[in-house]
Image (cartoon, grey):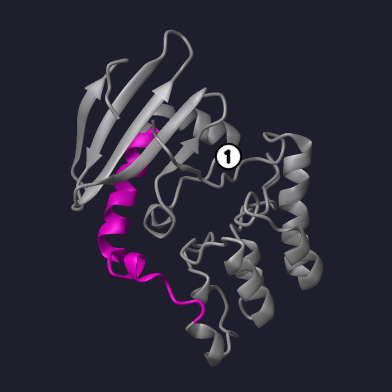
Amino acid sequence: VFSSYDYPLNVYEDVFHIGVSECHQKLDKLGKDKNWDELVSLVNTGNVDFSRLPIKDDSNSLPSLYTPLHHAAAESQSSIEDLLKKGQLNALKNKWRNSIRLSSEKIPREKIKTLELPENVKNKSESIAIMEKSLHAVILERVEKLIQEHGVQLPQLAFLYEKGPFHYSVPMMYGGFNVKKYNDGIKVHSFCRVWGGSEQDHIIERNGKTTLKATGYDCAY
């Protein structure tokens, strides 16, 4: 049995149930408005990494990937600590590929240590970036059309090294991608349950080399 975390998806606003979409948008607005008390009160382990969802066919609505911690980083030390206690990830980057610490130039010196990347991420940053590109290639090879149709943001591999194995779901795939560490690299098990279904196991080495190890329903994860 694959035990994992659900990767925090960012998709077009109309893809999620309205309640889920509204939660994404509300948390982002509270962060922009610097309403820290209400923001922290609404955050829980299920939505702590939510970010604003873009609106399809609106060129002015783009995903910023600002989580609650991105918003709070330069402003509220107590909110930073509260969000980290609720499981907010430190390594997630915004749309401009900036980590929490680098997302604002206004972060006071005393907060920098709190927002340092986890050692497990910092020490492997180069290989994580390389393997992430290969992971994205595996995903796009299977479901690029669905990714584009639903505005799905591709996963950041640092999630694996800060939090643990994760499941990356793709709308209308009726399946997704399970990602875990494997030797010095990662293993990606993807599955689809429609039109007869299919499964694939890919091994991605730390240098980015990708090998398809198995296909069909006999894949062993």
Residue at the outermost front position: 1
Q: Position of residue 74 (x, y in %)?
A: 63, 80
Does the magenta-highlighted stretch encompass residue 72?
A: no
- For the C terminus, which image quadrant? top left
The amino acid pointed to by label 1 is: Gly
Q: Is residue 77 above or below residue 146?
A: below
What secondary structure is the stretch in magenta mostly built from?
helix
Left or right: residue 188 compared with residue 176: left
Q: Position of residue 171 (x, y in %)?
A: 57, 30
**Region of the chain picked out in magenta, as a range:** 114-140
- Say whether residue 35 is visible: no
Q: Position of residue 144 (x, y in %)?
A: 44, 32
* Circle 1 SS class: loop
- For the N terminus, which image quadrant? top left
Question: Considering depth in this image, is 216 or 1 the residue closer to the camera?
Answer: 1
Identify residue for label 1: 151
Left or right: residue 134 compared with residue 195: left
